[in-house]
Amino acid sequence: MQDKQRYTIDDLVEVVKDLRTPETGCPWDLEQTFETILPYTLEEAYEVADAIDQGNMQNLCEELGDLLFQSVFHAQMASEAGYFTLDDVIHDLTDKMISRHPHVFGNKTAHSSSDVNAIWDIQKSKEKSHDAIEVSSALDGITRTLPSLLKAQKLQKKAAKVGFEWDGTLDVLDKLEEEIAEMRAAIANKDKENQEEEIGDIIFLLANYARMLDIHAEEAVRKCCVKFERRFRGLEKEIEVQGARMEDATLEQKLNAWNNQKAKEKRKCS
């Protein structure tokens, strides 16, 4: 049996061009814009993360392909509008990676990840200084549409670089207790607007605490969501085995089933 033809990146580029060709292309693809495609781009990035979290390499291969398609599709629309081409994207990316790794492609040296991070920041600053018209704030350069936890940590990191930083992690915990007290006061006053503000302060502070511990807050919460879903599905199955419906089971039954799921996970890890 003859092997199926192995397609290349050039074939993918041609497929996308065909999809976007007026009269003969796909009506749906022809209707798309940068704005309408954006939700799919974000979704594909999260599906890549999900495949990695599950350790499913076959699924990861597929999801990386879907994410690559998004890049090619955006580049094709940009090319049609005369903004840039996929070749420009590849050139600029390659040039940036070489520039930001002088310890690999130049005469710099790096012996640890912290060394690499320092070099990366220096090279990035040089690039920005060439392109920037005027820097008005240390917080400039952060993407506005980032997920909130990720954006919080990027804001905090930039502020810390110019000395706006806690002396130590214990100071953050002291501040957390203060914020929780303010949240309790907002609850007692039944002030909904203030409650929202205080919850935001608490979450922002926890993101900062995670940053100081070198923990990626967005990833930590994503893993927590995965854990919750896994345990909750196990809880549902356990309640079903008991012959009850989730809607009819008592809170005590649900809590016992939840604790059983936690115990099962601990036994697997031991």
Image (cartoon, rainbow, N blue to C red):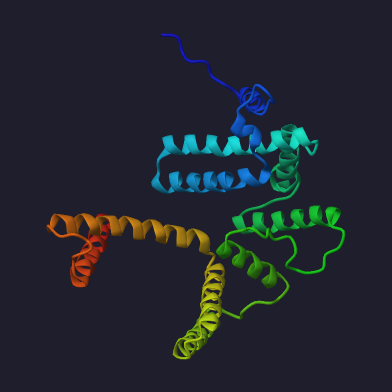
Quadrant of the frame with the N terminus: top left
Q: Is residue 229 above or below residue 160?
A: above
Q: Which residue does the image show at 56% across and 73% down from the upper left?
A: 204
Q: Between 208 and 97, which is closer to the camera in this rendering? A: 208
**Residue 249: x, y in percent?**
18, 66
User: Where on the picture, by quarter, is residue 57?
Assistant: top left
Q: Between 144 and 31, which is closer to the camera in this rendering? A: 31
In the image: residue 193, left or right of residue 158: left
Which residue is farthest left?
243
In the image: residue 144, left or right of residue 49: right
In the image: residue 99, left or right of residue 59: right
User: Where on the picture, by quarter, is residue 135?
Assistant: bottom right
Quadrant of the frame with the C terminus: bottom left
**Residue 159: x, y in percent?**
69, 72
User: Where on the picture, by quarter, is residue 30?
Assistant: top right
Which residue is farthest right?
133
**Residue 166: x, y in percent?**
61, 79
Q: Which residue does the image show at 53% across and 77% down from the upper left?
A: 196
**Residue 117: x, y in percent?**
65, 57
Q: Which residue does the image show at 61% across and 63% down from the upper left?
A: 151
Q: Which residue does the image show at 54% across and 34% down from the upper left?
A: 65
Which residue is farthest top?
1
